[in-house]
Each structure stands twice: as structure tokens, then as C-alpha cells.
Amino acid sequence: MTDICCIGHITRDRIITQVPPMTTHCAGGSAYYMAWAIASLPSDILFHMITSVSQEVMPEVEKLRQAGIEVTAFESDTNVFFENKYGANMDNRTQRVLAKSAPFTLNQLKDVEARVYHLGTLLADDFAPEIVEFLASKGDVSIDVQGYLREVVGEEVKACEWADKLRLLKHTAILKVNEWECQTLTGMTDPYEAAQQIHDWGVREVIVTLGGGGSMILAEDRFYETPAYAPTKLVDATGCGDTYSAGYLYARARGMGYAESGQFAAAMCTLKLEHTGPFTHQIEDVYHVIRKNQ
């Protein structure tokens, strides 16, 4: 059986940064960043990616397959196209969506078997509630909440309410949120109180990333805190949260504890911040970051 199945669209991305001033065009999306991160780590867990792409983006699927990733790719007439624009502070990002893909369907996912299903949501309509409930009946559901809290109005990405949050969080084993998402979900400004509220709604492991403030994990009625490890240079934060999810789920699948998994994920984020594109380092590089910050 697959250890981790990641489901999400591969996007076309336009990344615009102020520091350094640069415009980059590349593939992206939660599932894409997670898959490449997993491909860079030792292949001692079974990973399966499910995506939906246009023919224009199918070469990116073939690159992943050549790197050893099992990919199921459904064809979509159109492909998600994101523009991510960063200010001088990489925690500040504005987005536009210039095209969308079709949502995933229950029929596409009915035969998938995995211990953990990670939903790399990009937009609020990527996954119908019935899909989450179905996958939760077969394994643990892991969600990066970002897509559930944004919708497209014209080309602009706007914040929105997660209308089905109480229905779906009780079926969610692992939830990753950033500080803003945490507050949006709960209405609470204290991330510890907000994490506790999310846990009380039914989530077993609540992960809160705090940008330069590091991250914390609430699990089994205890908080586990990890500081942010400073990168040698700050280039591009796109995909950083997805890299964290990849590191955390990979570490947990290998039997690591919550604190160790948080440190492993944070170190992967540090390395990812130092370049544009997905994580491409080795596991020795991850442990080097952890050791030099102890």
C-alpha cells in the first residue's frame, strides 16, 4: 500500500520578486512541490501523486516519472495558471489566477489506496466535500488549508470562508495552516488558542507555520515548537509550505516523532528558500541545517 498519496493540480506559475528583482516562469502547485521534495529524499516510503493537467503541462509529469515518482495524470482542457508577486518581505504575497483546471472527481479517486491522503488544495472548489469524507474512510486525510480559503473573482484571488470546515475538519487527521489561515479559520489572534480550537473540531495533528517565527505542532494535547532556521540567502518562498508538508509527512511515515518531524520539515523549508523552484537537496543537507542550529 502507498504510504503517502498527494492529490493536486500542477500549475503554470509566474513568480515576481522584489528582492532580488526577478520574474520567473515555471511549473508549480502544492502537489508538484511535494512530489519533487519527496523525489529528493531516500526512497524508503511509497509515494503516489495524482494530478490533472493540460497537454501543455504533461512534460512536467514525464519529468517526475523519470525522477522515480509514480504519477497518475488525468487530462484537463485547461491548466491552473498562477501569478505570485512578493514584496520585500517574503511573507507578503499577492496572487492572480489566469486560468483554472477542472475539479477532481470521486470517480477519479475511487480506487486509490494509501495510508495518508494529502490534499494539495489550490482553490476552494478543487475537492468536493464527498471526496474528503470518502478518502477519510480509507486512511488519514492531510490538508493544506490554503486553497479552501481563497476563491477567484475575475483574475484576483480573494479570501473566502471555508463553508464546510466543521463538516470536513472532523475527517481531517493532519491540518497545516499559516498564522493568517489559523486566525481566519477560528477568529482567534493567538495561534496557540486557535490551534487548540482546530484540534477540538476534530483534527489530530495541527501544524501552524509562523513564517520567520518558526512553526508549532499540536498533537496528543502537547505543543511542539520549532524555530525558523535562517537561510544563507532568501530567494523565493513559493512552495515553502508544500515543502514543509512533504518533510513532515515523510518524517512521520518513517516513524519520527512530532518534534523531530517538525525540525526535519523546517530544515527542508530553509533549503527551499534559497532558490527558485522545488526542493532539490539531499537528506544529508537537511540534517546539516538541523545540526548547525542546535
Image (cartoon, rainbow, N blue to C red):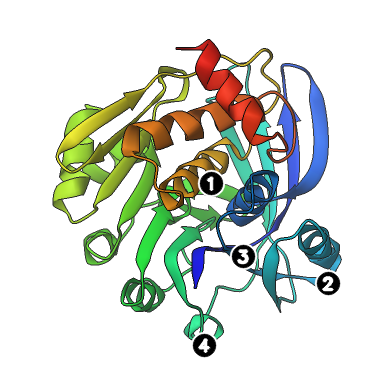
Residue marked by disc 2: 55
Which of discs 2 and 1 lies nearer the camera? The answer is 1
**Where in the figure is residue 28, as x and y percent of width and height?**
70, 49
Of mark 2 and mark 1, the one earlier in the sequence is 2
Q: Quick check: can you spot residue 160?
A: yes
Q: Amino acid at mark 2?
A: Gln
* CA–CA distance in space, label 4 to label 1: 26 Å
- Tell me which residue sits at (62%, 49%) in the image: 38
Question: In terms of image quadrants, where is residue 213?
Answer: top left
Tag 3's secondary structure?
A: strand
Which of discs 3 and 4 lies nearer the camera? The answer is 3
* CA–CA distance in space, label 3 to label 4: 16 Å
- Tell me which residue sits at (79%, 20%) in the image: 21
Judging depth in this view, the residue of 46 and 105 nearest the camera is 46
Residue marked by disc 3: 49
Instruction: Give the class, few, some or many, for how many residues have Cα within 10 Å of label 1's Cα (few <14, many ≥20).
Output: many
- Tell me which residue sits at (22%, 26%) in the image: 190
Question: In terms of image quadrants, where is residue 230?
Answer: top right
Of mark 4 and mark 2, the one earlier in the sequence is 2
Residue marked by disc 4: 107
Which of discs 4 and 1 lies nearer the camera? The answer is 1
Of mark 3 and mark 4, the one earlier in the sequence is 3
Tag 4's secondary structure?
A: helix
